[in-house]
Amino acid sequence: MTINPGHSRNPGSDGPGSAELDAALRQFAQRPQILVALDFDGVLAPFVRDPDAAAPMPSSVAAVHRLSRAGVHIAYISGRPLADLRSRAEAPAGAVFVGSHGAEVAMNGDDGADADAVELSTDEADRLAALNSRLASALSRTPNTWLESKPAGVVVHTRGADEDEAARALEQAREAAADFPTVKVTKGHHVLEFALRHSNKGEGLSRVRSSLRPEAVLFAGDDTTDEDAFAILRPEDVGIKVGPGETAARYRVRDPQQVSDVLEQLAELVESRDG
Ligand SMILES: [Mg+2]
């Protein structure tokens, strides 16, 4: 059965227990080689005002470890820098990490803290420093916003600002960055990201897929940047959009709690397959 992408104006109506997602999970779990790829913020970790305080839901951590023990490949795909993602994921051994929207990838077995991490050229480093200082001065008088430095970019955070403040901050940030035409600008939930390296979660997920060669992939994401990953999914894959909004994903759940429910259901299915 085909579900019209983005048809759900009522998030959660396709949540765990819905017949379509249930059937898709059952079929997916039958395959011996599968990859479960998960965005972090808003999917494994509920949103919190301070991104440094974000932590995965314990029930999701437990379900992911069960899946890993049952032989399922696990990947974390996030806009966060790889080292930050790795430090807070509470991941099982052998998990794959894709950080900075695909710009950093640590494949299965990489044990270095910064495997395949971004290394900037001198020119890139100079441009990044210049971009950082332009944004910092542009936002210096806008309350409740802050900048986060990334290995190959800068993120403007507006969580905590009211709507007017946030809109003003984003406009000022875009103006300040206008002199950096090769920088890619990506809008997310309460963030505006400026990236020197152009990659996306779809490219990151494709790299993981071609390395691990699973028969099928489940990917769950909540943000506009996750659409690049939904876009590369195949008919045998399971794409799950978390929360409201337009999406190319075939299924939808409401929130990280329902992601946890899906992961637990999948763990049960995979364990009973193996048993
Ligand atoms: Mg997210």
Image (cartoon, rainbow, N blue to C red):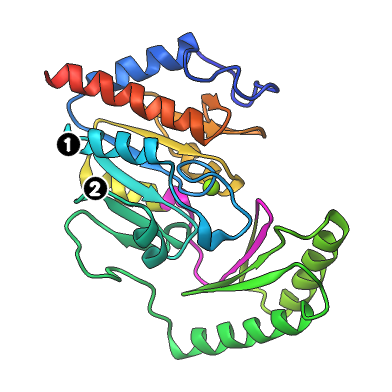
Judge by depth and name the residue closer to the eye, 210 or 45: 45
Counting other residues with Cα less than 10 Å from the Cα at mark 1, is it few (<14), some (14-19), or many (20 or more)? some
In the rendered image, the vertical position of residue 127 relative to residue 118, given as above or below: below
Q: Are marks 2 and 1 in contact (CB under 8 Å)?
A: yes
Instruction: Please name the residue shown 41% across and 60% down the image.
Output: 99
Instruction: Please name the residue shown 50% across and 86% down the image.
Output: 125
Q: Quadrant of residue 168?
A: bottom right
Q: Quick check: can you spot residue 214?
A: no
Magenta stretch containing residue 16, yes or no? Answer: no
Tell me: 63 left or right of 52. Answer: left
The image quadrant where one finds the C terminus is top left
Residue type at mark 2?
Pro
| Rendered location of residue 126, percent (x, y) | 54, 90
Instruction: Please name the residue shown 17% across and 26% down the image.
Output: 32
For label 2, the residue is 92
| Rendered location of residue 131, percent (x, y) | 64, 82
- Helix, strand, or loop for circle 1? helix
In the rendered image, the vertical position of residue 167 relative to residue 137, given as above or below: above
Judge by depth and name the residue closer to the eye, 145 or 201: 145
Q: Quick check: can you spot residue 234?
A: yes
Judge by depth and name the residue closer to the eye, 107 or 209: 107
Counting other residues with Cα less than 10 Å from the Cα at mark 2, is it few (<14), some (14-19), or many (20 or more)? some
For label 1, the residue is 69
The residue segment tinted magenta is 188-203
In the rendered image, the vertical position of residue 240 relative to residue 44, given as above or below: above
Ligand 1 within 8 Å of disc 1? The answer is no
Which tag, 2 or 1, sits closer to the chain's start? 1
Residue type at mark 1?
Arg
Magenta stretch containing residue 191, yes or no? Answer: yes
| Rendered location of residue 218, percent (x, y) | 37, 32
